[in-house]
Amino acid sequence: MRAQSRVQPFVHRCRVYYEDTDAGGIVYYVNYLKFMERARTERLRDLGYAQSALAGEGLLFVVHSAEARYHAPARLDDELLVSADVVELNRASLRFRQQVRRAADDVLLCEGQFLVACVGADNLKPRAIPPALREAFTESRRSGSFEAGE
């Protein structure tokens, strides 16, 4: 099932700090993954689900696979806009499409896709995404392209 909409995607704002950069004041490449992780966490929080509460219920989300493409550097003190859009929802996994843009000029700095698995905290085996959370993600599909899998 695919749906398209003009609703704005979820965006998390963050700032580049000294600790995020290399000796030249440019964001170290792996830190883009951290920015995207934070945006996915804030996306869950925006839907009403804190990772700590989910973990307390025995549910974790783990990255199964990651793909990133770098386009331009972010620098110390840049404000970043990090999107986190669910483009595929399966029984026990989600696929996020993400972008990191510089707020000042909207330049695309990095983009990626992440397959995130839902697992049990006790055994790290795949677990079905709880119905209420599935519904929250389904409702969020208005943020862009979305495929629901079986």
Image: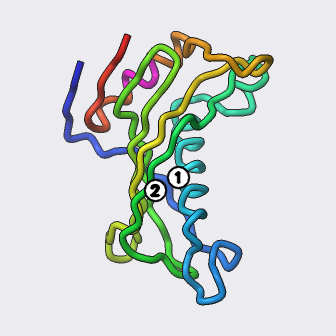
Tell me where residue 111 appears, x and y as whole percent. 39, 56
Query: Mark 2 against mark 1, which lies toward the viewer?
Result: 1
Q: Given contact means CB atoms under 8 Å apart, are the residues at marks 2 and 1 in contact? A: yes
Horizontal side of 109 relative to 21 (left or right) equals left
Identify the residue at horizontal 42%, vertical 45% (top origin): 113
Horizontal side of 45 relative to 84 (left or right) equals right
Of all residues, the one furthest to the bottom in this rendering is 24
The vertical placement of 105 against 57, above or below, is below
* Secondary structure, magenta segment, majority class: helix
What's under tag 2, amino acid-wise? Val
Tell me where residue 83 appears, x and y as whole percent. 42, 51
Residue with the mark numbered 2: 82
State the extent of the magenta-drawn residues as a range: 135-139
Residue with the mark numbered 1: 36
Nearest to N terminus: mark 2 or mark 1: 1
In magenta stretch: residue 43: no
Judging from the image, the colouring scheme is rainbow
Tell me where residue 70 appears, x and y as whole percent. 41, 66
- The image quarter in which residue 27 lies: bottom right
The vertical placement of 95 against 91, above or below, is below
**Element on which disc 1 rests:** helix
What's under tag 1, amino acid-wise? Met
Horizontal side of 135 relative to 34 (left or right) equals left
Tell me where residue 115 appears, x and y as whole percent. 48, 35
Identify the residue at horizontal 65%, vertical 21% (top origin): 119
The vertical placement of 49 against 34, above or below, is above
How many marks can you see? 2
Horizontal side of 92 relative to 141 (left or right) equals right
Question: Looking at the figure, which quarter contains the N terminus?
Answer: top left
Check residue 138 in the rendering and tell me which mark sits there, or answer none.
Answer: none
